[in-house]
Structures are given as structure tokens and as C-alpha cells.
Amino acid sequence: MPGIASNRVAPPLYQRQPKVRPRSEAKRARIVEAATQHFAEHGYHDARVGDIAAALGIAKGSIFQHFGSKDGLFFEVYKRAVRSFSKYLDVPAEVRPEGFFAVLRYWLVSTEHLVHEDWIPYRISLLGNYGTDLVLKREINRFLISEDPYGTVSFVRFGLERGELREDLDIEMMVSIIDWMVERFQDALLTAELDPGLFRRQGELSEKKEARIQQFLAMLQRAIGVPPPAAVSRHKSRSNHRR
Amino acid sequence: MPGIASNRVAPPLYQRQPKVRPRSEAKRARIVEAATQHFAEHGYHDARVGDIAAALGIAKGSIFQHFGSKDGLFFEVYKRAVRSFSKYLDVPAEVRPEGFFAVLRYWLVSTEHLVHEDWIPYRISLLGNYGTDLVLKREINRFLISEDPYGTVSFVRFGLERGELREDLDIEMMVSIIDWMVERFQDALLTAELDPGLFRRQGELSEKKEARIQQFLAMLQRAIGVPPPAAVSRHKSRSNHRR
DNA sequence: GCTAGTCGTGACCTCAAGTCAGACCATACG
DNA sequence: CGTATGGTCTGACTTGAGGTCACGACTAGC
């Protein structure tokens, strides 16, 4: 997979890199944008590099010159898409003080809206998670670990500082668990609409969805949240309005 | 993706299918076997249908005649691999009476052994989960839901009957959660060896692994297990020996 | 042995990723 | 201005994979 390898390997030591070549940078951006569209619409396999070039009115060779390979191109597309997502702690000002699980709840509830308003990056992220090659998937994992684009690490720190999360778990493990669970939960909510039958026979959506989010959060809270102080003192946290 | 579509769509109504054509069946099996080997070694993308044919000393066209497409072939390979796995409740006789979480623990601990002794189906399942096209992935999901090859549903029923699992959760949700978590946890344990850096900087393996399994089980138990009866009466469950 | 239907073949087709020699341009300098 | 220099763009080209198909070889019933 030359693209990925040769694209990222060893930024050559010789000093050159004159002034960020504004022209080239702009063109790369244009290509990535068009490619995003195409991948989102057709999936990885069925997207044609030639079509992307045609849509831009440029030569196919140009794309390969910039990104080395289809993989390389998709990787850039993926990174941009994922970076465009909000981080966990980017919630409306009034939500944050309500604490860790309120923030999580906020995102789970918003999933649907976000996706319908801005489905393209979600689709791209889905492709990156499930629809490419394992080689690329590995590269993607490295990226996710090194950039932590959803800000899960600081989110967990936030929960720890507020005393809402257990102290006896590895922080890495909590981070992984949250990433996994939320990702899968969102995928399930989403693909259930696109392809009923993926989430075990869900059937009725809207009402049940609310209930499921509730269940899911409660579960996660039991799993990684600080245990409640023996069912006494239910006054500090009256923040949980709505049902 | 003609293979998958035409392969699975509408098993034609006309009665024909004379007597299971013993010759053909045997050949299909041979092909699937060789293909399994190849996919496991090279991944989906880099596996060549031509190579598989060559390895068997038959013509490439033959493979397409039997399976319609590379996807179709892989799908068969995947199904066979996954079916070859044990079901949750297939544990040594002495483990089962120890209950739901003991069974789970058994599998998590054995993961490593199983994988080293019989890595090929694991690799195939990994490919099916992450390394192909979304279209195929959907087909795979349907298969997993309709066949429940790991027996997760009866496993959960088992836990419910023994009163070890909460009654206030959808059974489907518990099934999904268990499938997700175990799958990811295993992948993480495994790929950490193949590609350190996938599981957030794990580093020291053997000792930490044991601790992680412990943490993981405890977490899952809090999440979906029946709550302990107020920290009193710690006698019924002396089954949890070993630390 | 003869006929029907199946199976297997390998030459062939299609089409997408990827390559590359040269044209094109923008700037730097004389 | 005009020429040199080096990055950029092109499109015709190569490679190689998945997939097709007309035909011949084989098997089974009569």
C-alpha cells in the first residue's frame, strides 16, 4: 500500500519546504472535499478516483500525485471528517455543569439530529471503521489513538475530577470503553434506520429510542460511575429533569 | 456486488436441486478451505482468487461458477469460520455451574490460547468485522443476527434463569452489549500483540492482562449483573475462588 | 454405445488503480 | 524583457485484478 506508507514515512530531513506552497495546499483541500462527497455517496470500494477527478475537472494523475493512492486519499478524507466532529466537552454551556453523564446523554440524544444535518462525515467515519482494508484500519486506529479527536481523554478526566467516575479503573480502559460503547451505540441507532435488522429487531423507533438511551446511560453509570452513597441523600443532583 | 446479491437473493422457487450433487459439494468445501487459508494469510484485499485456484490446481472460472464473486466466496469462508467457534455455553462441565460470569471469565482467559492454536478463523472473523466492504458487512450482520453463532442469546437466558442478570434490561440490549464488549475486548487483547498501539499503549502484557480481565468482568457485572444484596450475606457465592 | 445435463476450462473481456515523460506555468534572476 | 528553474498538471499508457462464456470433457441413465 504505497500511498499510505510513502505519504507519511520520514518527512525528509533536508530543510526545504519553502512556504507551504499555497497553490498546492488549496488544491489538496479541493480534492479532499470532492472525494469526501464521493466516498460518502458510493462507499469506499465503489468510489472511483477517476470520477472524483472528473468532477473537479482535473486529471486523475493529479490526485495520485497529491495523495499517492486511493487509500492515501481516503485516509485524508477520514481524518478531516473525524476532526470536524465536536469533542465531548463541546456542549452548550448549561449542560456541562450538570456533569459527566449529562454530557454523555446530551450527545446520545443529539446523535440523530447531527446525523441528519450533517450526514457526510458520519458516513465517512462509518466507512473508516468498517468498510475498508485492515491495513488502512490499522492506520486509522493509530490516528485515533494519537489524536483523540473526540476528546475522550479530557472528558474522562473531567468525570474523574468531578468525582463522578470510579478511581479504581485504568483511565485508558475507561477511555476505550467509552469510545467503543458510544461508537457502537450510535452506529446501532443510525443503521437501524438505514437497515432495520442490524440492531436486533428494533421495530418501533422513536419512543423506544429514548428508553434505550436511558437504559444505556444507566448501565454505563453502573459500570464506570462512582457507586451511589447507599441510596441516601438524593438532593445534590436534582439536575436530572425530564422524566 | 453481483455475487452476494445474486447468491442470496430469492432461493428460486422451482423445486430443482436434485440430490445435493455430492461432487459439487465436495469441491465447494475444498475451495472454501483453500480460500480460508489465503484470506487469513493475505487479508481480503490482497488475496487473489487466481492464487486460490492455482493452489488447488483448478481454473479461476470454476471458483466464480461456484460462488459468483470474491465477496460471495469470502462470505462462505466467513460463515464457516464463525460457525467453527464454540458457543458461550460450551465450557468444561465444571465451569458452567459456577455461573454466568465465571463462564465469561473462562472465555476471556482462554482467548489467548484459542487464538494461538487456531488463529485462522479468528483472523477471518477480524476481516469480516473490519476489513471488507460495507455491503458485505451488512450481509455479515444479518447472518450474525439470524444465526447467533456464539449462542449469546441462550447464554443471556442462562444468566437470567440463574438470577445473575438484571431483569430490567431488554434482552436484546444485553445480547448486543455482550457481543460488542467481548468482541472488542478480544480484538484488543489480540491486536495488542500483533500491533502494539491499538489498545492504548498497553506495554506490559502478561501480568496486566490478568488484571484487565478482572477489571473488565467486574465492570460488566456492575453494568448488567444483579446488584449485590447491600453488601451483607457474602456466603452464597463462594464460587469465585482464585483471588 | 448414445444422449442429456453438469462441470470445468482457459482464453478473453472490462475496467480501475497507478505510472510517467513531457507540456505548462510561476517565479527569480540577469 | 527573456531565460532558467522547479514545482504542477496532464492524458495516454501499463498492469493486473475480477468476472464471463463458448465449448469440450465427463457422468449417468437408458
Image (cartoon, coloured by chain):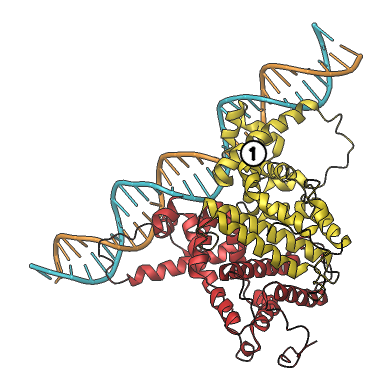
Chain colours: A red, B yellow, C cyan, D orange
For disc 1, the chain is B
Label 1 SS: helix
- Classify residue D15 as left or right of residue B175: left
Q: Is residue A171 visible in this depiction of the protein?
A: yes
Image quadrant where one finds the C terminus of chain B? bottom right
- Dividing the picture into quadrants, the one containing residue B59 is top right
Residue shown at 53% from the left, 63% from the top: B200
Expressed as whole percent of the image width and height from the top left, the position of residue A4 reads 45, 55
| Tag 1: amino acid | Thr
Q: Which residue is mark 1?
A: B36
| Residue B218 x, y percent position in the rendering | 70, 66
**Can residue A46 be seen by looking at this rendering?**
no
Give the tally of numbered discs.
Answer: 1
Seen from the viewer's position, the closer of residues A121 and A64 is A121
Residue C1 percent location from the top left of the image? 80, 6
Q: Percent from the top left, x then y, of residue B156?
A: 82, 59
Q: Is residue B97 above or below residue B227?
A: above
Q: Is residue C16 left or right of residue A224?
A: left
**In terms of image quadrants, where is residue A104?**
bottom right
The crowd level at tag 1 (other Cα within 10 Å; few <14, some 14-19, many 20+) is: many
